[in-house]
Image (cartoon, helix red, strand yellow):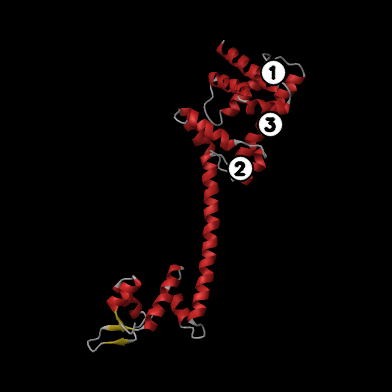
Amino acid sequence: MDELTVGGLARLAQVSVRTLHHYDEIGLLTPSDRTAAGYRIYSAADLSRLQQILYYRELEFGLEAIAEMLEDTATTAAEHLRRQHRLLREQIDHRHDLLRAIEKEMEARQMGISLTPEEQFEIFGANYLGDEYSSEAEQRWGDTEAWRQAESRTTALTKPDWLDVKAETDANERGFADAMRSGEPSDGEHAAQLAEAHRRGIGRFWDCTHAAHCNLAEMYLADPRFTQHYEDIALGLAQYVHDAILANAERHAG
């Protein structure tokens, strides 16, 4: 290429003629020549300079900053390219970090928990199966009002909120285990208090009626994962919690 008109350069560089006129007006890209009629004529060197300008623009530099960098005669075109390559790599790395952070947040929100995986591990431990339970629950109850309540309420909880939930849950489960070991009957007053506290804890997430609470209690025996959770705390605890919940519901129904 020996020379280009402003229209030819605009088509080649995929910019507007108006942009090239503006660059000329501010002295950022002055054409090497003009015709007798005053029309702009651009050379191969002008095209190379325009390429540098457009690269820096893509890297989000302002026009004044670009002009200062290109006026530095000590910096060669090759050095500009190396600088642009480094800056672009840094942007790509930053974008990758941002993408990973967004994906973690998407995963957490899909699970109904506004926590990173590291925070989930910290709070709930290595055996936490929230994603598995959430997927199954959504398939089973996704079109219910209870599911919509749970999804809305859990996404609003912060890490301190989840720490409170975990502490209350652990205390309630220890209370059930201590009551069982001490011989408290599952249909007694103390067990009923524990069962009611258990129901209120679930009420953080959705409006858990006593009938719904009984349905959950049945899962504690029907689903081996829930059963194992309670059995790991104390042998026979799954059955005890189940019986206490049903007895408490019967009390309130009466």
The residue at the point 41 percent across, 72 percent down is: 54
Q: Residue furthest bottom?
A: 36
The residue at the point 43 percent across, 76 percent down is: 52
Q: CA distance from mark 2 to mark 1?
A: 31 Å
Q: Say which residue label 3 marks.
A: 170
Mark 3 vs mark 1: in front? 3
Point out residue 43 in the picture as x, y percentages from the top left corner: 35, 84
Point out residue 9 in the picture as x, y percentages from the top left corner: 32, 76
Q: Amino acid at mark 1?
A: His
Check if mark 3's residue and mark 1's residue have beta carbons within 8 Å: no
Q: Residue furthest front?
A: 1
Q: Give the structural element (helix, strand or loop) at label 3.
A: helix
Q: Amino acid at mark 2?
A: Lys
N-terminal of the two: label 3 or label 1?
Answer: 3
Disc on res. 182: none
The answer, for residue 172, to whether it is visible in the render is: no
The residue at the point 54 percent across, 24 percent down is: 208
Say if 120 sits above or below 186 in the image: below
Q: Give the structural element (helix, strand or loop) at label 1.
A: helix
Q: Say which residue label 1 marks.
A: 190
